[in-house]
Amino acid sequence: MLLALWSPKGGSGTSVVAAAVALVAAGRSAAHLADFGGDQPAILGLPPLPALATLAEWLTAGPSTPSEWLDEIAVPVVPGLSLLPGGPAAAAASAEAGAAFSVAVRDSGLAVVDVGSGPGSPGGAARAVIEVADAALVVIRPCYLALRAAVADPRLGSSAGVIVVEEPGRALDGDDVASVLGRPAVARFPYRAEIARAVDAGMLRDHVPAALGRAAGTVLDRLADLANGRRAA
């Protein structure tokens, strides 16, 4: 199963959401977290990664590159979860490489892809992952500027739903976001100080705050239905 998470605007919390979903998933079965944004090692509090091959190199090595090489790239995070580090160079690889990566990882348990934020390259690997994922979800705050960018983003057409990162004091709420984007609100992630502290301290992989874990579990509980709905469409 391949889950792609993306946002039309930076600062929406896509990487934290992706990390939380992957960590909770690891408590259920084997999972991979692919990092197209580049922030996952810091969010997960990992030590400096050794200078080994990365996902970007796998993606640019050509169609003959064996999928087994992904196992060599994988960095253990917690039992049941490994990180495929990549960064923006991975996102900028070709669409063909992105499609090949999707095929390689979708049958080895759950693969969560942190696609990152911003418009991305129309013909790049990140866009291809969104287009062929079993489920692609938009991560967004109830912000007018973010909604405006999402409505105009062609990736919305490949997305099955929305993850709303709720902030106190906003004039808009999750229902408004779902209505504007024409996609169901799959889960609502709270914006809380305890979550920010866990991320800032590099402690997220050791302890997922309860509210964050519940929201991530909701995404996982709905994943099969989202994937089936996309295949039916």
Image (cartoon, rainbow, N blue to C red):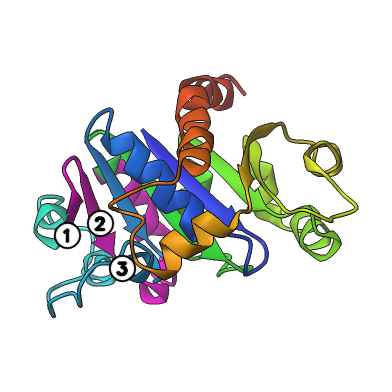
Front residue of 8 and 76: 76
CB atoms of marks 3 and 1 within 8 Å: yes
Sooner in the amino-acid sequence: mark 1 or mark 2: 1
Describe the element under mark 1 as helix, strand or loop.
Answer: strand
Residue 206 image position (x, y, % from top left): 28, 52
Q: Disc 3 marks which amino acid?
A: Pro
Horizontal relation, residue 155 to residue 178: left or right: left
Q: Which segment did they paint magenta? A: 76-104
Count neighbours of disc 1 (C-alpha within 10 A) and say few if under 14, some if 14 to 19, many if 20 or more: many
Amino acid type at circle 1 is Val
Instruction: Report crowding for label 3: few under 14, some 14 to 19, many 20 or more residues within 10 A (C-alpha).
Output: some
Give the residue at mark 2: 83
User: At x 37% / y 72%, what residue is drawn?
Assistant: 87
| Front one among 176 and 5 | 176
Verify CB contact (< 8 Å) between mark 2 and mark 3.
Answer: yes
**Dot 1 corresponds to which residue?**
75
- Residue drawn 25% across and 59% down? 84
Residue 41 is labelled as 3
Label 2 sits on a secondary structure element that is strand
What residue sits 18% from the left and 74% below the top? 49
